[in-house]
Amino acid sequence: MGWTYSEEWAHRKDLIQERIQGNDWINPDTGIRCVNKILAYCMRGNNLWKVVESFRYDKDGNQIHHNRWIGLDLLQGGWNQPCWGYKDMDETCGPNAVNCPLAYLEMVKDFPTVSYGIAWRERVLEYHNAKKIAREAKKRDAKLTQAKFTVEHDEKNDFWGVYSGSFCLVNFLTKTEADETLKRMQG
């Protein structure tokens, strides 16, 4: 549950290369063969996200287990040593990090997880939804700042308005209020 460091990983890329290798080993006590294949991986800051496919085989080579899951390695440079280290976990730990690619959730959707994993997958979806809303708001705001605004007087209704084309965005009783609002809108 701690961190693993090694002088073999003098650079971040060395550690990443090590951590994206699958593994194939036999449990000496049970004779069960364990195979983990990395199907996809990516970096988000110092978060190394992986989709892992796991197989277990009995002594006779019969497949006894198959699963696909999302793994996370938190990477960190050595505090006072020229090396890198990692702390590994999977989605069943309910990690705090939620910047996992959405495509990875799609890759594991047909494979079950435990309650922590279910809650974590929901938080990842919420994170990406919030980012999408923020991107849309930024686009909308960019369009708003590019729009041409004018202050005009509506003589029929006797008010001053800030207009975008023929559409009155806000109206005021005085021209001064309309002018001040236009200045604020134009930044």
Image: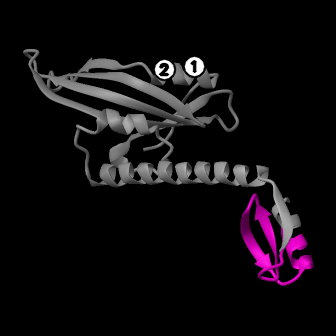
Pick whichever, 131 or 9, lies toward us. 131
Asked if 119 appears above or below 33 in the picture, the reply is below
Q: Which residue is at a point 46% across and 34% down the rendered structure image?
A: 49
Asked if 103 appears above or below 140 in the picture, the reply is above
Q: Which residue is at a point 48% across and 20% down the rendered structure image?
A: 18
Residue 65 visible? The answer is yes
- Which residue type carries mark 2? Glu
Pick whichever, 78 or 117, lies toward us. 117
Q: Decide if residue 22 is on the left or right side of residue 33.
A: right
Query: x, y percentage for residue 165?
Result: 75, 58
Does dot 1 land on a helix, a strand or a loop?
A: helix
- Circle 2 sits on which residue? 18
| Residue 14, numbered label | 1
Alpha-carbon neighbours of circle 2 within 10 Å: few (<14), some, or many (≥20)? few
Q: Which residues are magenta?
A: 154-181
Q: Is residue 162 magenta?
A: yes
Position of the N terminus, as image quadrant, is: top left
Q: Which residue is at a point 34% across and 55% down the rendered structure image?
A: 119
Query: x, y percentage for residue 151?
Result: 86, 67
For the residues labelled 1 and 2, the Cα–Cα distance comes to: 6 Å
